[in-house]
């Protein structure tokens, strides 16, 4: 009884020292987050509550910038286009990345070469990839136009960035080429985490390839798929470079994403206060998606 009572006071200072040491270790990261995230966000919130011109003194406007966005037709159009783009590009990325993950997950000849070749576009910057595809889609010196003509898909030279449908599909193709390798790596990680004993047991029990995929692989990869899905959706909502470089928002300003519209309002029209309000609204959307991500990753963890 006496030893128990005397041990308690000696343990508390040790725990306090460990806690202080832990705070000391994370202090640099906390400082970076404070300087480069928290303070800019707070300043952006402050800007969003003002009419903030490029030159001159800002004036208080309250929630006027936030109420304005609900009647801003161009912003609503940009939001609708971004949602449409996010929906189609996410489906396209998974339609390509999942079969590739199943292909490279198995041991086969030259598998390292296949993995490297598929992942290689990921290391190319998005701006560089956009410029590359602008050249490939060029009507005179590009590669895609003559290729489509030789395949008999077009009767002559075609400008893939001149019409909305063609430009939309070209941008999606570029993003899939650029991002599918990254999503593939995430999915391969989930596939390799599945115990081989379960797969062998299912095969011994007579389960076919489709049955193993549907009732074993997909349920065990739920969290991995949710993570890859949320990363793809978040990245698509923040799309800017490909539209700015490849289409400049056209044709007919129909390919302006939310981030592109915020850029125009802030640095073209110099409506800095309104642009800040739009940025905060976009941040709220991303936070909501992050909450969904956490829920998707944690659902089922409490099951016995």
Image (cartoon, rainbow, N blue to C red):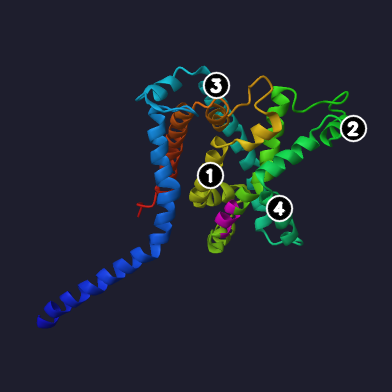
Residue at (61% x, 32% y) in the render:
88
Q: Secondary structure at mark 1?
A: helix
- Residue matched to label 3: 77
Q: Pick the residue in front: 51 or 27.
A: 51
Counting residues from the N terminus, which is met first, the one under dot 4 or under dot 2?
Answer: 4
**As displayed, is residue 88 above or below residue 96?**
above
- Residue matched to label 4: 120
Main SS of residues in magenta: helix
Mark 2 closeness class: few <14, some 14–19, many ≥20 residues within 10 Å: few
Mark 3 closeness class: few <14, some 14–19, many ≥20 residues within 10 Å: some
Judge left or right: residue 179 versus residue 300.
right
Instruction: Report the quarter where the N terminus lies.
Output: bottom left
**As displayed, is residue 189 above or below residue 256?**
below
- Residue matched to label 1: 231
Residue at (35% x, 52% y) in the render:
302
Q: Secondary structure at mark 2?
A: helix
């Amino acid at each position: 009884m006496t030893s128990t009572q005397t041990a308690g006071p000696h343990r508390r200072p040790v725990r306090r020292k460990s806690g202080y040491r832990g705070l000391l270790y994370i202090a640099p990261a906390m400082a970076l987050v404070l300087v480069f995230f928290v303070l800019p966000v707070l300043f952006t919130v402050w800007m969003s509550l003002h009419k903030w011109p490029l030159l001159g003194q800002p004036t208080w406007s309250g929630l006027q910038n936030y109420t304005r966005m609900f009647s801003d037709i161009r912003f609503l159009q940009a939001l609708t286009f971004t949602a449409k783009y996010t929906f189609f590009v996410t489906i396209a990325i998974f339609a390509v990345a999942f079969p590739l993950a199943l292909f490279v997950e198995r041991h086969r000849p030259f598998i390292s070469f296949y993995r490297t070749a598929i992942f290689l576009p990921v290391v190319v910057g998005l701006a560089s990839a956009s410029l590359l595809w602008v050249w490939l889609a060029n009507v005179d010196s590009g590669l895609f136009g003559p290729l489509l003509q030789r395949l008999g898909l077009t009767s002559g030279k075609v400008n893939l960035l001149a019409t909305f449908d063609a430009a939309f599909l070209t941008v999606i193709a570029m993003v899939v080429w650029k991002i599918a390798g990254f999503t593939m790596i995430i999915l391969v990680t989930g596939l390799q985490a599945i115990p081989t004993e379960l797969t062998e047991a299912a095969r011994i029990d007579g389960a076919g390839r489709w049955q193993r995929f549907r009732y074993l692989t997909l349920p065990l990869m739920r969290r991995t798929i949710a993570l890859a899905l949320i990363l793809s959706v978040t990245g698509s909502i923040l799309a800017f470079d490909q539209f700015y470089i490849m289409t400049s928002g056209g044709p007919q300003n129909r390919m302006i994403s939310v981030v592109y519209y915020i850029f125009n309002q802030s640095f073209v029209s110099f409506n800095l206060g309104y642009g800040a309000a739009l940025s905060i609204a976009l941040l709220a959307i991303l936070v909501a998606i992050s909450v969904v991500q956490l829920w998707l990753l944690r659902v089922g963890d409490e099951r016995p």
